[in-house]
Amino acid sequence: MKIIQCHNYYQIPGGEDSVVEDERALLMSNGHEVAQFTRHNDDVEGLGAVRLAAGTVWSRAAAKALEARVRAERADVVHFHNTMPLISPSAYYAARRAGAAVVQTLHNYRLLCPKGTFFRDGKVCEACLGKAVAWPAVRHGCYRDSRAASAVLTVMGVTHRTIRTYHREVDAFIAASEFTRGKMLAGGLPKSRLHVKPNFVMDDPGVGVGSGGYALYLGRLSPEKGLETLVAAWDRMGAKVPLKIVGSGPMGPQAEALASRHPHVECLGWMGQPGLGEVISQAALLVLPSLNYEGFPKVIVEAYASGLPILASRMGSMGDAVVEGTTGSLFTPGDADDLAAAALSLFQDRGLLDAMRHHARAAYETHYTAQANYAMLMDIYEQALQYRRAS
């Protein structure tokens, strides 16, 4: 099978970029031809505001270039990840005109929420869900704190809902969790073409040792990730549960201040391999205190691959992935007392933590290996091709 991956890379690399590269390696390792049609947000500089806005809604240049690429490659499937702002949904039309099936991975909630996160003013917000026009997002300047930028994304959404782009031009959608699929169904996407395929790790790190005796936070240091809850919980616990914080972001100073108050808390900044793998292997517990729905954090799969239990907010896709009392535990989002109590309870019951390590690894082996993911991806591609031929 010949596949073209279509992706607009972000200026700050994130989880979506990582998934694109993982899937490319997965497909190639299984004998498929994989080409890439990419743009990068660095290229936004130099474009005027009007030109950028128009291209976000409908990019003729990207559509023309992709159509030629699909014909030249004779691609069977064009798999889209991020189309904003330099590719746009016009590329769906181009791919189908050239004869390919169109698959779109839903990494976030952008089709239903201009900001893409269902998160505003420190809490979940679904004010735009189900609305024909996302006026609340424009009024609040949800995207990049800009009413103008939010208006552009709102126009994009209205335009493509009106001409039924997502219903007519996309042969299969991929959601990373049942929770995300449910939200997309609520937003009107076609049920028969909404598939669930979680994220995965390309290389099995092997079972970790878990002997470090610390909890681990791994991710962006920002409000929607629940950093305030994390800081408050560890201030309450004193030295009872050691913590390592790995990541960077706007709340870095608050994390550093927590470490300065408590010698058992350590801020390691952002880490790459192999150091990060060693930190995960030694950890006793991963903490995910997010206040937003998330898509499906790849760190969940990385933790399970290492046999690392997870203590997460009872929120969104994390509630799908963490099985209470089996692969980890859940606490009330934003409740520092509940987080502290749950962390203390787990650290005081090492037998339970050991059992959770076994179940976490079993969850990885059952659901999140590269080969399990490959089987799911191939099934989705085949269904997309069947729908393309039938339509």
Image: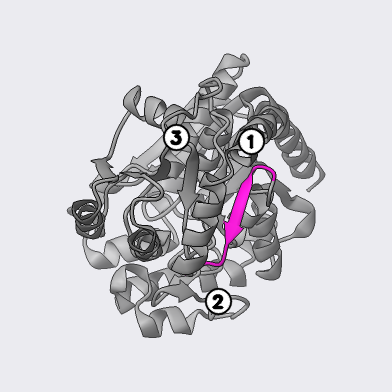
Name the residue type under label 3. Ala
Q: Position of residue 151 (x, y in %)?
A: 38, 76
Q: Circle 1 sits in a helix, a strand or a loop, which is it?
A: helix
The residue shown at (44%, 67%) is 336
Residues 160 and 328: in front is 328
Name the residue type under label 1. Ala
Of callouts 2 and 1, the N-terminal one: 2
Q: Position of residue 18 (x, y in %)?
A: 44, 36
Residue holding disc 1: 360
Which region is colored magenta?
326-334
The numbered disc on residue 283 is: 3
Is residue 303 shown to the viewer in this render? yes
The residue shown at (55%, 18%) is 28
- Asked if the stretch drawn in magenta spans residue 116, the answer is no
Of callouts 3 and 1, the N-terminal one: 3
Of callouts 2 and 3, the N-terminal one: 2
The numbered disc on residue 126 is: 2
Q: CA distance from mark 2 to mark 3?
A: 35 Å
In this rendering, position of residue 214 left or right of residue 349: left
Q: CA distance from mark 2 to mark 1?
A: 32 Å
Q: Circle 2 sits in a helix, a strand or a loop, which is it?
A: loop
In this rendering, position of residue 283 left or right of residue 148: right
Relative height, residue 124 to residue 224 (above, below): below
Is residue 110 shown to the viewer in this render? no
In this rendering, position of residue 45 left or right of residue 20: left
* Residue 51 sits in quarter: bottom left
Q: Circle 3 sits in a helix, a strand or a loop, which is it?
A: loop
Residues 309 and 171: in front is 309
Q: Position of residue 236 (x, y in %)?
A: 37, 64
In the rendered image, the quadrant that contains the N terminus is: top right
CA neighbours of label 1 inside 10 A, class few (<14), some (14 to 19), many (20+): many
